[in-house]
Image (cartoon, helix red, strand yellow):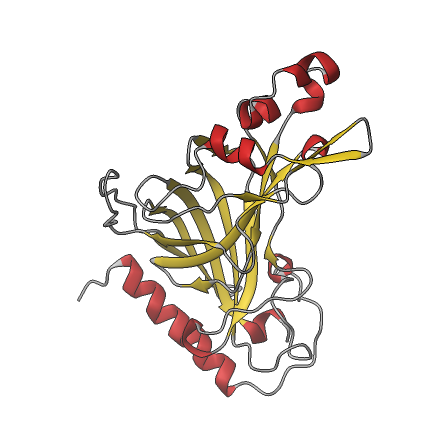
Amino acid sequence: MKLSPAKLVLVMAAALLAVAMLAPAAEATTPAPGYEQFKGCPSPAENPKIEACIHSIVTSGHFQMGQKDVPIEHPITLTGGTEQFLEGFQYNSEGGLQKVKQKVPGGVVGLTGLTFLLELLGSEALTLYAVTELAGTPTVGFNNITLPIKVHLVNSVLGSKCYVGSNSSPIVLHLTTGTTSPPAPNKPITGKEPEFGADFELEISEIKGGIYVDNSFAAPGANGCVLTLFGFIPISINGLVNTQSGLPSPAGTNETIQHIDSELTAAVNVYP
């Protein structure tokens, strides 16, 4: 009987986890050679319940909310570990979602509509970046990933705490390789299942080439965006950001498509 790539991954993952359950307690606190990419996975000293280590990379794609569409031009890494059956994703200080700057088209002027800033500061000083940060605990699977996030809008003109989403009100992405069922006006979009591979020498499962999509999520309004005039007069510009960017934006008006490659191995391989 021929197994699908997804089922092959499940079979190998089950075998790796079985090894973890049978192995003696590990004591290493740094990854073994060949497993350095899993350094964000908690060691047994940090969490003895971790059985599998995961390293995922968003290699490309885009993230659109409201009227702003940001291309993912720089890879973003998610690293951590799970307990039995890929449950209970956790990570240490080296793991989680890597904070990577993605350039926002239009810059600060496009975000706020404040064209006079060009004369005061020049276009280079108004380059705007978006940094995706975790705002809760992810749930990982082979065909589905749930990511609670907040987006940090980075430019000194906006202050240091300009965000869309927060820990208490996150943007929750339900990424799937299947077909979405968004509310109108969005229409269903379909991802692509990853392909299975393996490094049998190191016992690492490779889940690569997956396209994960979501166009059913909502995005809240901006918060913490402050323009400081003359160096000492702070003025909230949340309203300007929201008006110019089309925020808050309800479910059915946003979209993300993410190309993701992942690796999975037993924790006892990483920390022998």
Q: Position of residue 69 (x, y in %)?
A: 45, 31
What residue is drawn where x is 56% and y is 69%? 90
Question: Foreground: 188 or 28?
Answer: 188
Q: Position of residue 258 (x, y in %)?
A: 41, 43
What residue is drawn where x is 35% and y is 58%? 144
Q: Quadrant of the N terminus?
A: bottom left
How many numbered badges does the structure rendering display?
0
Residue furthest right in the image: 231
Q: Quadrant of the C terminus?
A: bottom right
Question: Foreground: 181 or 184?
Answer: 184
Question: Foreground: 41 or 252?
Answer: 252
- In this rendering, is residue 266 above or below 111? below
What residue is drawn where x is 82% and y is 34%? 232
Q: Is residue 202 left or right of residue 118?
A: left
Q: Position of residue 149 (x, y in %)?
A: 51, 53
What residue is drawn where x is 51% and y is 69%? 89
Residue furthest top in the image: 119
Question: Foreground: 205 or 91?
Answer: 91
Q: Answer with the quarter of the image where residue 41 lies.
A: bottom right
- In this rendering, is residue 170 above or below 82? above
Q: Position of residue 257 (x, y in %)?
A: 38, 41
